[in-house]
Image (cartoon, helix red, strand yellow):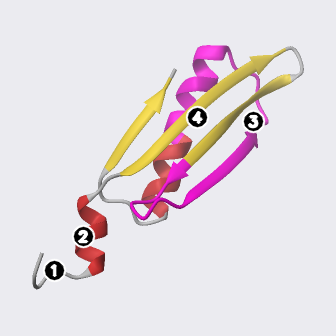
Amino acid sequence: MTGTTQEEVSEERPWLLHVDGSSTTQGSGAGVVITTPQGDDMEFAIKFDFNASNNEAEYEAMVLGMRMTQDAGALHLLAYSD
């Protein structure tokens, strides 16, 4: 890859987003793992301050994770949820 910068090579690889939302009688929240193109992981546990069904928590986790990766500078993203 002659003439290609490290930044260009890194951005060819997508960021990875894994999310899992959860809802219990004690509340709802999400787990978010973001992996950069360089392979660095950022892990987050978030407690929502509102009641949500399990499906709503999954949806909120995905939206939150997508916003977080965008704020971190991601241009290409592969997102996974159960």
In primary-sequence order, the first of circles 4 and 1 is 1
Mark carried by residue 39: none
Amino acid at the residue labelled 1? Thr
**Label 4: which secondary element:** helix
Contact between marks 1 and 3 (CB within 8 A): the answer is no
Tell me which residue sits at (53%, 50%) in the image. 34
The alpha-carbon separation of the residues under discs 1 and 2 comes to 7 Å
Contact between marks 1 and 2 (CB within 8 A): the answer is yes
Mark carried by residue 9: 2
The alpha-carbon separation of the residues under discs 1 and 3 comes to 42 Å
In primary-sequence order, the first of circles 1 and 3 is 1
Q: Viewer-proximal residue, 55 or 13?
A: 13
The alpha-carbon separation of the residues under discs 3 and 4 comes to 10 Å
Q: Residue furthest right?
A: 26
Q: Is residue 32 above or below residue 24?
A: below
- The percent position of residue 36, horizontal first and vertical second, equals 45, 59
The residue at which mark 1 appears reads as 4
Tell me which residue sits at (61%, 56%) in the image. 42
Crowding near the residue tagged with mark 4, few <14, some 14–19, many ≥20 C-alpha atoms within 10 Å: many
Contact between marks 2 and 4 (CB within 8 A): the answer is no
In primary-sequence order, the first of circles 1 and 2 is 1
The residue at which mark 4 appears reads as 61
Q: Nearer the viewer, mark 4 or mark 1?
A: 1
The residue at which mark 3 appears reads as 48
Q: Is residue 40 above or below residue 23?
A: below
Please check the rendered image and state whether residue 33 is part of the magenta-colored stretch, yes or no: no
Q: Which residues are magenta?
A: 34-63
Amino acid at the residue labelled 4? Ala
Compared across the picture, whether 20 is left or right of 11 comes to right
Tell me which residue sits at (57%, 56%) in the image. 41
Tell me which residue sits at (29%, 79%) in the image. 6
In primary-sequence order, the first of circles 3 and 2 is 2
